[in-house]
Amino acid sequence: MNRRTLLVTAGWLGAAVLAVLVGLTGVRLIGAGLTSPESRPRSAAEVAEDLRSLPSPSPSATRTPTPTASQAVGSPRGRTFPTRGGTVVARCATGGPEIVTMSPAPGFALHERERSEGEFRSTSDNHDRVKFRIACSAGTPSLQLRGD
């Protein structure tokens, strides 16, 4: 071995030792914070004691909130419809049936979406389709599957 190869090898070895020491020091410092007594799990008795020491809620905090416009009495009710192509959330709005959201199932993609009709298509076979239409009866939406 010549002198240059020996110096390069010694340099690499020194750098490796230094990297390992820095890593171990970092793990030791981080680990000390994770396993210190302040971060140990609390017992059920300690949790119960902490809960008893909390102030009781004020009457205004337990009051039932006033419904918003979308939650008001007589507002359209939404329903979730699972299909093999995905999940559809629909409601009966003032203007008629309405799709709120469409989430494709694994292996399917959203292909079409209109106000009350939609379609999921397979990502592997474009001919595997789930077409549907939303209808309303007495303010309750229903899903009707359609053929091609």
Image (cartoon, rainbow, N blue to C red):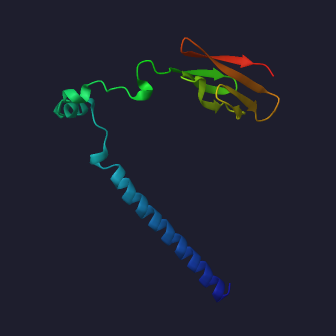
Q: Residue at x 61, y 81 (%)?
A: 8
Tell me which corner region of the image, top left, top right, bottom left or bottom right, holds residue 82: top right
Q: Which residue is nearer to you in this view: 64 or 93?
A: 93
Tell me which corner region of the image, top left, top right, bottom left or bottom right, holds residue 10: bottom right
The tally of labels here is: 0
Tell me which corner region of the image, top left, top right, bottom left or bottom right, holds residue 55: top left
Left or right: 58 in relation to 25 = left
Q: Where is residue 147 shown, x and y percent of the image?
A: 79, 19
Q: Where is residue 104 shown, x and y percent of the image?
A: 66, 32
Q: Residue at x 46, y 21 (%)?
A: 75
Q: Residue at x 44, y 18 (%)?
A: 74
Left or right: 3 in relation to 30 = right
Give the quarter of the figure containing the N terminus: bottom right
Q: Which residue is nearer to you in this view: 56 or 13?
A: 56
Q: Residue furthest front?
A: 95
Q: Is residue 68 above or below residue 74?
A: below
Q: Is residue 40 above or below residue 64?
A: below
Q: Residue furthest bottom?
A: 3
Q: Which residue is nearer to you in this view: 124 or 62?
A: 62
Q: Is residue 2 above or below residue 26?
A: below
Q: Where is residue 72 shown, x and y percent of the image?
A: 41, 23
Q: Residue at x 25, y 33 (%)?
A: 47
Give the quarter of the figure containing the C terminus: top right
Left or right: 105 in relation to 53 = right
Q: Which residue is nearer to you in this view: 62 or 31?
A: 62
Q: Where is residue 25 shown, x and y percent of the image?
A: 41, 63
